[in-house]
Image: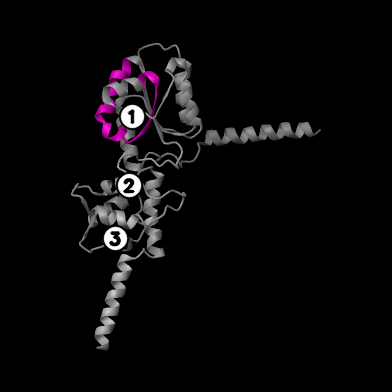
Amino acid sequence: RQQITSYLYSSLSSITMKFSTPSSSICLHLQKLVDVANKRWISMEDLFDQADVDKSGDVSKEEMQLLLDQIHLTDAVNFDMVWSSLDDDESGEVTREEWRDCFSQITPSKVSAEGVTWSMKPIYRDDVPGGLVALVAHNKMKAQMASFVELNVEFFKHCRIITTGSTGKTLEDKLGLDVHHKVASGPLGGDQEIGALVTQGLVSAIFFFKDPLSAHQHAADIEALTRVCDVHNVPYATNSASGKSLITAMAAMGLAFARDDDESNTVKEYKAEQQRVIQRISRKRKY
């Protein structure tokens, strides 16, 4: 009788642990996945779809290991611990419901968000500033831009898009794409408006299909926009070939893949020199 009681107690404890909130040590490992998703402005639902390589509706052990490798967490988390938390029924497969139930208990460590977003549509959270993707094209390149966006609509329909007025109208009319914000036409200052957003750290990438065979009355604005992208390390593509590369990079590493890169030495040196100038002027005024 004592052995039976001990066995039942052990079984009940195991079941209770299985269905209770994950322990703090397990939470820390699961939290790392949530933080990666937040950094890339993607929902945990999207992360599940990324893990479900064969589109079976479930995630296998091999697929989960592949996901951790893709997001560079293989050495940062305890796989067995994470897997035991996700595979609630120990079937060897993680269903979407198991994934949701597990991660709904995990709070992001770096942001005080409302929780994990489960919507399939936005891959951004409202509490994270920026993440804009700019789409701009000169008049003779608008058709090519529209074709490019149409070919990659599954990517762009999840983006928070900003465009110049004329390009935005083309994308809305031709593709029914939802444009987050429109600025003025390029020659009327639209390129400068986008450049200002780049300077504020609100733009993740720019697709600017430039017409290389025509003169432009706002050539100085075009040069200024690409220059400010170089200053602030914002990736930009100027044709369909480089556009494909940029989409591939963002799909693999997230929309914010360049966000945490260090400033270039040129920018660092410039800022240091500016500080020295300010200090010299301040010292002169004291006298």
> In what element is the residue under mark 2?
loop
Q: Which residue is mark 3?
A: 83
Q: Which quadrant holds residue 86? A: bottom left
Percent coordinates x, y for residue 209 in the rendering: 35, 22
Observer-nearest of 49 and 270: 49
Q: Residues within 10 Å of mark 2 (few under 14, many from 20)?
A: some
Quarter of the picture containing the N terminus is bottom left
Amino acid type assigned to the residue bearing label 2 in the image: Trp
Observer-nearest of 280 and 117: 117
Observer-nearest of 20 and 135: 20
Q: Which residue is mark 1?
A: 178
> In what element is the residue under mark 1?
loop
Q: Report the disc number at residue 118.
A: 2
Q: Which quadrant holds residue 90? A: bottom left
Q: CA distance from mark 1 to mark 3?
A: 38 Å
Percent coordinates x, y for residue 253 in the rendering: 35, 42
Q: Across the whole image, how many numbered discs are drawn on residues?
A: 3
Single out the mark in the foreground, 1 or 3: 1
Q: How is the image coloured?
A: one colour
Q: Please provide the residue range marked out in magenta.
A: 140-167
